Image: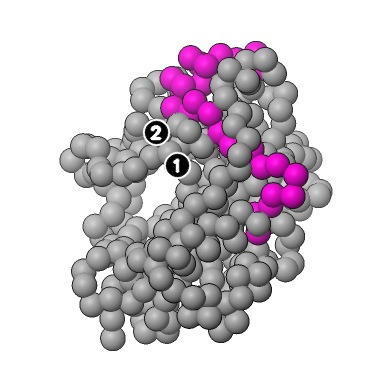
Amino acid sequence: MAKYARITGWGKYVPERVLTNFDLEKMVDTSDEWIRTRTGIRERRIAGPGETCSTMSLAAARRALAVAQLLPSDVDLVLVATSTPDYLVPSVASMVQDQLGATRAAAFSLQAGCTGWVVALVTASQFIQTGGYRNALVIGTEHLSMGVDWTDRNTCVLFGDGSGAVVLEASDLPTGLLSFELGSDGSEYDALIYPLCRRPPTQPRGDRSAASLPAHGWPAGLQVCHPGPGRFRGQGGHGGRANRGGDRPDHPPPGQRPDPGDGAPPIEASPRKDDGQRGPVRQHVGRLGADCAGGGD
């Protein structure tokens, strides 16, 4: 049985339309300097007419398969992570599986917000490492611009559209995803809300009732997208097991968020190793914006 899931192919698709910080200066009360110092973002891509998560994913998938030198009929699993699907049903994964011609493949989508790409990569790797599948096509995609409030300067500067895809194949070589650590802090669920068509039927929490939650959009804006270095350091290298021994010393308590303007922007603060040094992580958020599950950051 193969022990590793090797990345053998990769591809991306981003829309042609570029929306720069200078363009946003003409739309809302903001500036290029204000955006860059807080987010690291200079520009983002915006989907055009007819571009959706399924169409962008299909283009990225074809490029990834070409690099891996696989045919669609070779694919065992299509896994898509997105928070902005074309429809609730059918899933984006099923649409891509059909349009790609991956007739042998199982297909499903998952929704995990900004961690969607990571969760999808971990999930697909498990299918391969346990011997269930020989390969998997993993796609992260978002069409966030369709729900952005372009009059809200705290949130419209953040998000972009696009898709990224990789092919994983079984391997005996120690490569690919060597370890992982998944976690979650649901204590501030109402800090980042994107309802479908009605207010969520949730119970009141503290002084915040369901009726007080926004019907649309991201109320916290930069607060959520700037979790601070402490949220990332010390993670990884645990062989896939979460640290359940209590809060790490360098983690802020649940509910405590740093000032968005304090310290380095997320593009600089996030990819750190345990020793605090920057890891070898390629970043594109400065050019593509934060496309969450699309993997742009």
* Residue at 57% in and 57% down: 59
Instruction: Residue under label 1, please give it.
Output: 297
**Residue 102 seen in the current view:** yes
Choose between 264 and 187: the one closer to the eye. 264
Q: In the picture, residue 123 is in which quadrant? A: bottom left
**Residue 122 seen in the current view:** no
Q: CA distance from mark 2 to mark 1?
A: 7 Å
Residue 63 lies in magenta, yes or no?
no
Q: In the picture, residue 267 is in which quadrant? A: top left
Residue 251 percent location from the top left of the image:
34, 40
Instruction: Residue under label 2, please give it.
Output: 267
* Numbered disc 2: secondary structure: helix
- Contact between marks 2 and 1 (CB within 8 A): the answer is yes
* Numbered disc 1: secondary structure: loop
Choose between 35 and 105: the one closer to the eye. 105
* Residue at 45% in and 42% down: 297
Region rendered in magenta = 28-54
Residue 206 percent location from the top left of the image:
64, 39
In the rendered structure, the answer to whether residue 288 lies left or right of residue 96 reads left
Q: Residues within 10 Å of mark 2 (few under 14, many from 20)?
A: some
Q: Amino acid at mark 2?
A: Ile
